[in-house]
Amino acid sequence: MSAAASLVNAALIVILGAPLGLLAILGVSSLVGRPLPEPQIGRLTRVFTLVAFVAAAIAFVVHTLSGAGPRIVSFGLWFGAHGHGFALDFLVDGVALGFLTLALALCGVDAAFSYRYLHREPGFNRYFVLYALFASGITLIALAGSIEVLFAGWEFLGLSSALLIGFFHERRAPVRNALRVFAVYRLSDAAMLAAAVLMHHWTGAGTLTQLFYGGSTGSASLDASQATAIALLLLIAVVGKSGLLPLSGWLPRAMEGPTSSSAVFYGSLSIHAGCFLLLRAEPLFEHAPLARALVIAAGVATALHATLSARVQTDVKSALTYAALTQVGVIVVEIGLGFTTLAFVHMIGHACYRLLQFLSAPNILHDLHELENAIGEHVDAARRPAKARAPRWLYLTAVERGFLDALIDRLVVRPFVVVASALDRFDRLLCGPEGRDRG
């Protein structure tokens, strides 16, 4: 093994260990009922995040300068049974290390903001435990070399996201919206799990080189129907996690969480995790034309829907969310058309820009008042240029966000509740009076 490869491997251990170590320290102290003081939490978070970022940056520079190609770094098996093993593999290449370096930098910025923004908040310690869980998840997604590692990161990301949406659990709305988002994430996770099962069944292993690279050992080893099935399942997972149509309704509900979590989740990183997965699996979609066409269609529809909805939002966080979703739709279209380099650059720039916008959102009114004080008068809305009036049906569709929630409630949720209620009544009938008493 070359010196460059050895250095990258050592950096990889640090990258993986830092967020998981932070999660262990903060999580264990919380479980034993002895949470750390705020200054110690802030100091530990800064140190661990900085260490992981520096290690990722060094690994990225060394790997790029060495000119080495992509390679799998294996830490053995999680466990094996009946000839199948779940590998603890990590894929090292320029895309993974570049995305991870950006992700850790944005996590560090958000952590510094959160430390001040949530000062003396009762859930301060809980927030940073979930922050560490999120950082661990995005690290596993970026470096995943097997679909088992990818699924673990996918779960970490979804769990931390849902719990942060319900962060202010003393109010009813955040809890209800967190449950709604968690239900959508369950659909996304089920599709990811199904893709993992099919990969093991058809290829005998879960290595992601089967999906991320072509050739005799890559996605070309799958026939057209197999490639299409796995690609469609990955697309469903991405639709749920990145808020593409028709599952965009959960995105404005996610704004119930703290502004700092909204910034790093739905402005910069979490919403792009699906785009990153599509970008990595683009060679697979070359062998699945139907799935590629659906990717393009989902991206175009999402961009149009989000553009329309963003123009009628009355709060800044919802407007920023739909603006971010518009760009995510465009990025998905770029990936579907095969412009992966353009999509990667677009994703990096958009993540940085949206993080800044979300973090500055609480100061908008303050900035407006400073502007008015500087010019010596109120900013009059009547002086703004007149906008063209849209048809009433178009405006209503935008205000109701495409009626997506109503359609899903009527076509999916209500039939499910009816069936579940009927099965519950049937179960009580079979159990007799004792079963009814227990109910």
Image (cartoon, helix red, strand yellow):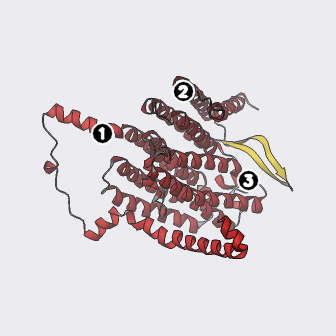
Residue identified by numbered label 2:
46
Residue identified by numbered label 1:
364
Q: Position of residue 221 (x, y in %)?
A: 72, 61
For label 1, the SS is helix
Residue that appears at 52% across and 71% down: 414
Neighbour class for label 1 at 10 Å: few (<14), some, many (≥20)?
few
Cα separation between marks 1 and 3: 47 Å
Residue type (three-letter) at the residue carrying disc 3: Gly
Q: Position of residue 363 (x, y in %)?
A: 32, 36
Q: Position of residue 117 (x, y in %)?
A: 42, 33
Q: Nearer the viewer, mark 1 or mark 3?
A: 1
Cα separation between marks 1 and 2: 27 Å
Residue type (three-letter) at the residue carrying disc 2: Arg
Q: Earlier in the sequence, mark 1 or mark 3?
A: 3
Residue type (three-letter) at the residue carrying disc 1: Ile
Q: Is residue 73 above or below residue 290?
A: above
In the picture, measured across the screen, residue 223 lies left or right of residue 283, that is right
In the picture, measured across the screen, residue 35 lies left or right of residue 369, that is right
| Res 206 label | 3
